[in-house]
Amino acid sequence: MHEKCGVVGISTADRDVARPLYYSLYALQHRGQESAGIVTHDGFQQYEHVEMGLVGDVFDESDLDSLNGSNGIGHVRYPTSGSVNNCCAQPFSVSFKSGSLGLAHNGNLINTGEIREELAALGHAFTSDGDTEVIAHDLARNLLEEDLVRAVKRTMSRIHGSYSLTITHDETVLGVRDPQGNRPLCIGELDDGYVLASESAAIDTLDGDLVRDVRPGELVVLHDDGSGFDTYQLVETEQTAHCFFEHVYFARPDSVIDDELVYEVRRDLGGALWEESGIETDVVMPVPDSGRAFASGYADAAPDGVDFAEGLMKNRYVGRTFIMPTQDERERAVRLKLNPIKSTVEGKTVTVIDDSIVRGTTSSQLVELLYEAGAEEVHVRIGAPPIVAPCYMGIDMASRDELIAADRSVEEIRDEIQADSLSYLSIEAIADALGTSDSDLCLGCVTGEYPYDIEGEQTDREVTRPAVGHSSADD
Ligand code: AMP
């Protein structure tokens, strides 16, 4: 089950935590629109409210009033494969002999099948096919034998893949980031407590301050009384696998991820796009909203400046096109979503800038729309390399046979979308803008080589799945 999601965890001194959790889930709504949930604990008992739908629809005043306690976690979810139903809405919660657990997961594991089989043979009953329940059961089992930190360490030694987790163990809130740091997770300070969140925009919403990112392989345990947090580097990492696509598309531009403001990264990528493939045209315009920062960086990088215009208007009430399950609906949705402003396009040569091409639906519709509005030439510039392979780590990228670049050259794609010219950004430019080396990024979707051991796919480094079998964390 691939999951692109948002997670949060908060411990406060003695304030009810349900509302700050609710506000931060609102701030993370872009990371998942299918379900939302909160789990809290008041020192005596665990409370939960998890439902299908948007944050604003899932919770009403009385739901928030019933979520007692000053410690808790929350989750927003959009599944990228599997059926749309409420089996996998999160946080997942479970009560067992030594307490109760709530678990919220962003990412995707590679080896849950093996762990699930092993735990099922030991009598664990599973109610969903999701990864999160497997992590929860594994942790619950370890907690019967070991303290919290050792139990988390043991679970981390067994699971392979991408995970940013927020967890409640009774009143204690914890955050864990996988050893490759694939998905983001950061720590923030509030007036009366601490917060863990997928993105710093959630911390801003609570009027808090970003402290730092959770380090790859690190466990953060918030103090139950909101007074601070302890950290444990449970797994040492030599090489990270940060998802570059968080910076390109998925995260909010106002979030800081791994020390970089996403907006500035996107502007830098736009600048690099000009350096690599800038072309003089009458006007440059972004595809709203995803192309905006790229287009402003691109226009600023042009030596004499270029005429920048908002030539495409967006209907903000149309959901992301990806929510439409069929190609026909997706095409209609693009037209519903975007409409050109004729006067900025008519009789002009136009460069249109977007962050990425996945199936090619948006760009081919756009080129057609711009010609219909009277454009003389339409040039397309894309702020990411061609997406040639699926994402197994939590972002909905469609399957290989749906990806327009999976088996086509750039020239063939240009021909397919009917643009006058088409250029993508290089992988080197991405690594440069992120101030890192490409070997510390997960580039699976643009190279077809992954930082994890995925069946039937190639790896870009030496990775081995942990052997399943219930070993001790000290082994
Ligand atoms: P497509 O129309 O299939 O080529 O998708 C490209 C458009 O969808 C671009 O405007 C992107 O901003 C946006 N996009 C890229 N990745 C995703 C994703 N994982 N989910 C939803 N939209 C996306």
Image (spheres, rainbow, N blue to C red):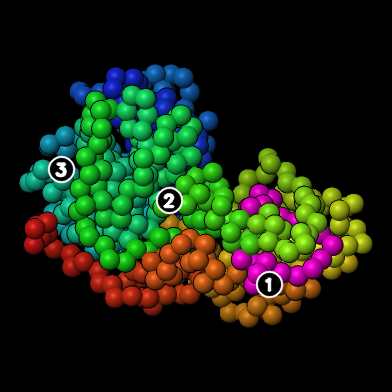
Q: Is residue 130 above or below residue 349?
A: above
Residue sitting nearer the eye, 135 or 297: 297
Q: Is residue 13 above or below residue 394?
A: above
Residue found 22% across the figure and 44% down from its top: 231
- Mark closer to the chain start, 3 or 1: 3
Marks 1/2: CA–CA distance: 28 Å
The residue wearing badge 3 is 148
The residue wearing badge 1 is 277
| Residue 82 percent across, percent down from the top left | 45, 56
Q: Is residue 260 above or below residue 74?
A: below
Q: Tag 2: residue type?
A: Asp
Viewed as shown, does residue 271 lie left or right of 238?
Answer: right
> Is residue 92 rendered magenta in the image?
no
- Mark closer to the chain start, 2 or 3: 3
| Quarter in which the N terminus is drawn | bottom left
Residue found 51% across the figure and 56% down from its top: 247
Marks 2/3: CA–CA distance: 29 Å
Residue found 42% across the figure and 25% down from its top: 19
What is the magenta range? 272-295
The residue wearing badge 2 is 259
Viewed as shown, does residue 451 lie left or right of 378?
Answer: left
